[in-house]
Image (spheres, rainbow, N blue to C red):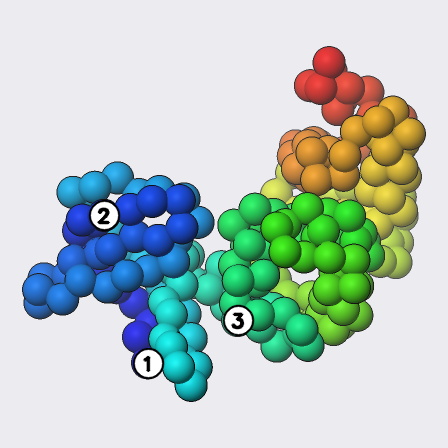
Amino acid sequence: MIGYISGTVVYSDSQKSVVLTNSGVGYEICTSTPMVPNKDVALFISHIIREQSQDLYGFETVEDKKFFEMLLDVNGIGPKSAFALISHVGVQQIISAITLENVDILKSAPGVGKKSAEQIILSLKDKISKLEVGFAVKENPVKTGAKVKGDHKMDAHLVKETLAACQGLGFKDHDVLPMIQKHLQEGIIQRPEELVKLILKELR
């Protein structure tokens, strides 16, 4: 199994890149964005072997690779859908969406429908709660409010109330959630209204 490739990009488009290694072998790798030709790259690889084909999916971090493979364990989620989630939504927002049971964020990825999004939440919610990756939400906080900067564990009620308020104002969850994450990491916020005001300053 191929797990890591480093070399020079000789071709790239919006879906795949060809990376030429020092051994003279060029590997065609599924990548989320076009890569710069003649540039050296190093990618963690998820090697998918099927009866009639083999595909290489490239990731900049080993965490993205591991999360991609975790998504593949969900019934009905294939490599293309899992890769679309990692590429278009991102690991931190996927974790947030699963923890908050937010189907709409997962549906924003190409090829992921409502049933698939619900299955992802059902299958991975317990696993996500045990992860130490990126943005997590605490379900039963001791007291309301986010902790100090650097602590990624946040009050689920605070996040949900803020999302609901922003939805009422016509904003999409996948646009708002990164801002919620940023502001909660920057300082202590105790009420949804405070968060909404900060977010509106950025969006308007």
The earlier-in-sequence mark between 3 and 1 is 1
The residue lying at 39 percent from left, 81 percent from top is 52
- The N terminus: image quadrant: bottom left
The residue lying at 78 percent from left, 58 percent from top is 114
For the residue pair 6 and 127, the one nearer the viewer reads as 6
Q: Is residue 40 visible?
A: no
* Tag 1 residue: 1
Whole-Å distance between the Cαs marked 3 and 1?
14 Å
Circle number at residue 11:
2
Q: Give the residue type that dot 2 points to.
A: Tyr
Residue 119: % across, % down: 76, 69
Q: Is residue 11 visible?
A: yes
Q: Residues within 10 Å of mark 3 (few under 14, many from 20)?
A: some
* Tag 3 residue: 69
Q: Residues within 10 Å of mark 1 (few under 14, many from 20)?
A: few
Helix, strand or loop under label 3: helix
Helix, strand or loop under label 2: strand
Task: Look at the picture and state if 33 lies above or below 134.
Answer: above
Task: Look at the picture and state if 1 lies above or below 193.
Answer: below
Q: Give the residue type that dot 3 points to.
A: Glu
Helix, strand or loop under label 1: loop
Q: Along the horizontal axis of the image, is 71 left or right of 22? A: right
